[in-house]
Amino acid sequence: MEKYEVFRSLAIIIIAAKFFGLCARKLKAPQVVGEIVAGLLVGPSVLGLVGYSDFLGYMAEIGVMLLMFTAGLETRISDLRKTGLKALLIACSGVFIPLVGGTLLYMSFYGFAPWGDDEFYKALFVGLILTATSVSITVQTLKELGKISEFVGTTIVSAAIIDDVIGIFVLTIVIGMKDPTQDIGKTFLMSGLFFAASLVFGYLFYRVFKVIDKKWPHTRRIPIIGLALCFAMSYCAQKYFGVADITGAYVAGVILSSLDDSTYISRKMDVNSYMIFGPVFFASIGLQTDIKSVDTSILLFSACFVIVGLIAKIIGCGGVARLCGFKGKDALKIGVGMMTRGEVALIVAQRALSIGALSGAYFTSVIFLIVVSSILTPIILKILYTDKAAAPEAA
């Protein structure tokens, strides 16, 4: 991409994303759906006006960080404590059911293979792709609906964070089964150390910010330093502990969520996210999709892959949420909120490709799942939350 081409691309993305976002809102759908559709339209699938680049990828990544940081800021610590065990159970089921469902789906199409066979590992990696949850779209939808800080919203975000960690463990275990040089124990240890370090240093950061907040209340230096903490924790989580960077961003938000000025920080973050980084992130989902170049020989498998991927999360997460005491439609909200897939699914697919466990043809299935889940999830959540007959949330 030429040096100044990026400005043209950003202008097209921002105008298209906001226009289709407003159209979606007029149609009673969340704006995020319109922004994803905008990416599909201006990207290689339809008009070809904008191509995906490393620069846009970096901006999209910042958009995810801001979104998760804001979600953390709007999380109540008391609710997080309440959702702890429930979120863990929901996340475990949300990994196990899709893993089994994806594995059985592959074997149903290509034959059942014995343990240790190459075809068995291919089936296992297909299941692994389905375990990943991308909560960023759900978070944005819940923010639009004003439900992010409610008990169900907090449970979804907590479960998705735990889901990420469990997914990393499972991925490492499966790779270790195929490649014995991988150190599974180290992965468990480093993830545990990250959360232990977050507790210790998180408390220290909170005390420092509390002093700053008291001395200079409601000043811009507070959100600026908070943003620095967000990026620093994202970097440390991924670089030194092998935990997803979005987890670090969310934890940074949770650390600052009890400050008197947490709402002020969140509002300042929203300005950046709403103006540029958010639209670029959601449009980038469409920009990375080229429908014209998909492998048509795998379309039937892809359709079944999408169906199994969506239903497995609803059954796995929503079913356990029901068993955990969530009444009425609240359990369904959790199941639907957990069914979005995104960059994590692509990372797992790329890892499988790099070690020869899957061929590039299966990226078609992954892309379809990401696009369909990204569009359907906010629409279904909007319907569930606007249903006047919805049951009250679990206490």
Image (spheres, rainbow, N blue to C red):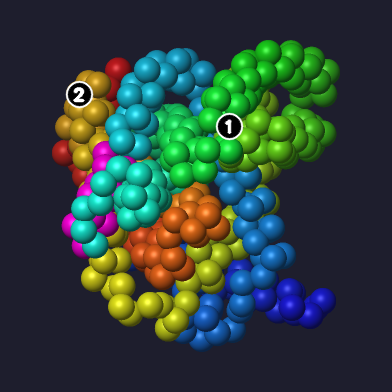
Residues under numbered marks 1 and 2 in contact, where contact means CB atoms less than 8 Å apart: no
Is any part of residue 223 visible from this angle? no
Q: Residue at x 41, y 31 (%)?
A: 159
Of the numbered discs in the image, which one, if any, rests on residue 183?
1
Of the numbered discs in the image, which one, if any, rests on residue 8?
none
Looking at the image, is mark 1 or mark 2 earlier in the sequence? 1
Mark-to-mark CA distance, 1 and 2: 35 Å
Of the numbered discs in the image, which one, if any, rests on residue 323?
2
Q: Kindly report which numbered mark, 1 or 2, lies closer to the viewer in this rendering.
A: 1
**Residue 75 horizontal side relative to residue 270, left or right:** left
Residue 337 location, x and y as percent?
Answer: 35, 43
What residue span does the magenta drawing correspond to? 97-109
Residue 335 location, x and y as percent?
Answer: 28, 40
Residue 272 location, x and y as percent?
Answer: 68, 51
Magenta: predominant secondary structure element? helix
Up the image or down, 339 lies above or below 257; here it is below
Quadrant in the picture for the N terminus: bottom right
Is any part of residue 231 visible from this angle? yes
- Kindly identify the amino acid type of the residue bearing the numbered disc 1: Asp
